[in-house]
Image: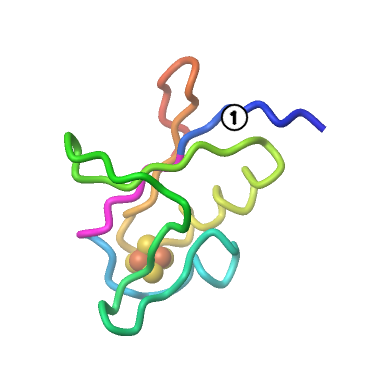
Amino acid sequence: MNNEKKYKIIFEKEKCIGAAACTSVSDSWKFDDAEGKTNLLKSRFNPENNTYELEIDESIYEKEYNAARLCPVKAIHIEEIKTKKRVI
Ligand code: SF4
C-alpha cells in the first residue's frame, strides 16, 4: 500500500458544534464531553490559522472525506498537499 501522505485534514475547531457526525464515520475523531466539541486525534495545532491539522495517506482518505462532507458547519476541510488544492 502507498503510505505517502497525500492529503491534509484542516479542522476549524472553533466552528465545531459537537454534532458528532465525524466520529460516526472515522476513528480519527473523538468527542470531548467537557468541551462539547470533537478533537482530531494526533493533529498539530497551527497557530497561524487557528486550525488543527493532520497529514493522511489514501487509506483513510475516503472516511475523512465523508467526515468533512457530513459536518453540518463545514469545520473540516481536506487539502491536497502537493498542489495545496482544497478537495472539500
Ligand atoms: S461533524 Fe463537524 S460539528 Fe460535528 S463534531 Fe464533527 S467537526 Fe464538530
Q: Residue at x 47, y 35 (%)?
A: 8
In-image side of 45 versus 38 (left or right): left
Q: Residue at x 47, y 58 (%)?
A: 41
Q: Residue at x 59, y 29 (%)?
A: 5
Q: Which residues are magenta?
A: 9-14
In the rendered image, the quadrant that contains the N terminus is top right
Residue 49 image position (x, y, % from top left): 19, 38
Q: Quadrant of ligand 1?
A: bottom left
Is residue 84 one of those drawn in magenta? no
Residue 85 image position (x, y, % from top left): 42, 23
- Residue closer to the observer: 82 or 55: 55
Q: Residue at x 31, y 72 (%)?
A: 37
Q: Say which element carries label 1.
A: loop
Residue type at mark 1 is Lys
In-image side of 63 versus 9 (left or right): right
Residue 54 image position (x, y, % from top left): 45, 42
Name the outermost residue toward the bottom.
33
When the figure is inspected, residue 38 is found, relative to residue 65, above or below; the finding is below
Quickly name the residue at label 1: 5
